[in-house]
Image (spheres, rainbow, N blue to C red):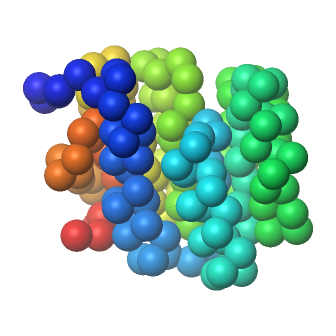
Amino acid sequence: MTQIDNTYNPLAWGSHLAPLMGCLGATVGDILEIGIGHFSTPVLHSYALASRRMLVSVEEDPEWFHMFRGRYECSEHKFLHGRYAELVPELAKQEWGVAFIDNSPGGQRRADDFSSLISKSKLVVVHDYYDENEHSIKPLLNGIVWRVYTDYQPYTLVASRNTPPPN
């Protein structure tokens, strides 16, 4: 897919919000956020509080972890700090309504997280679905229901083992 370079467009960092909110509205159950961010974390936090759903946010970078944890952690929103390669497989032992993947680095790291979570989540949302993320995840989509949201860039992938992504 051809992408516009949004490297210096901070509004592009929120291109996943519309599909993410659609997925939250179409599911029940706990919410998992892999990679904390200025757009996803506050929105997911507010949604979790309003809907009384548990949100778990995972971050590998200590600066990001402490900056967001101090502001948002509460009984409905837990934060975990550590290596994605260790935490995500453990978290994939439970069921999730929505798993949101937007961590760094992309590429194989996101593909590994996607592989771990696709069978344990009603819907998996992957932000920045282009370049290394698309190349790493696309081979994993056989037998999976999926849709790429292209209204805003960078694109967002929503996938499921059996639930059609929302329109």
Position of residue 96 in the picture relative to residue 124 (left or right): right
Position of residue 157 in the picture relative to residue 5 (left or right): right
Q: Position of residue 27 (x, y in %)?
A: 49, 75
In front of the other: 13 or 124: 13
Residue at screen point 56% across, 66% down: 97
In front of the other: 108 or 4: 4
Q: Position of residue 148 (x, y in %)?
A: 23, 48
Residue 68 position (above or below residue 61): below
Residue 1 image-quadrant placement = top left
Quarter placement of the C terminus:
bottom left
Position of residue 113 in the picture relative to residue 76 (left or right): left
Residue 40 in view (yes/no): yes
Residue 59 image-quadrant placement = top right
In front of the other: 142 or 133: 133
Position of residue 31 in the picture relative to residue 118 (left or right): right
Residue 67 position (above or below residue 91): above
Residue at screen point 28% across, 36% down: 154
Residue 94 image-quadrant placement = bottom right
Residue at screen point 45% across, 77% down: 25
In front of the other: 51 or 115: 51
Residue at screen point 57% across, 61% down: 43
Q: Position of residue 110 (x, y in %)?
A: 49, 29
Q: Position of residue 142 (x, y in %)?
A: 26, 41
Residue 121 position (above or below residue 87): below
Residue 143 in view (yes/no): no
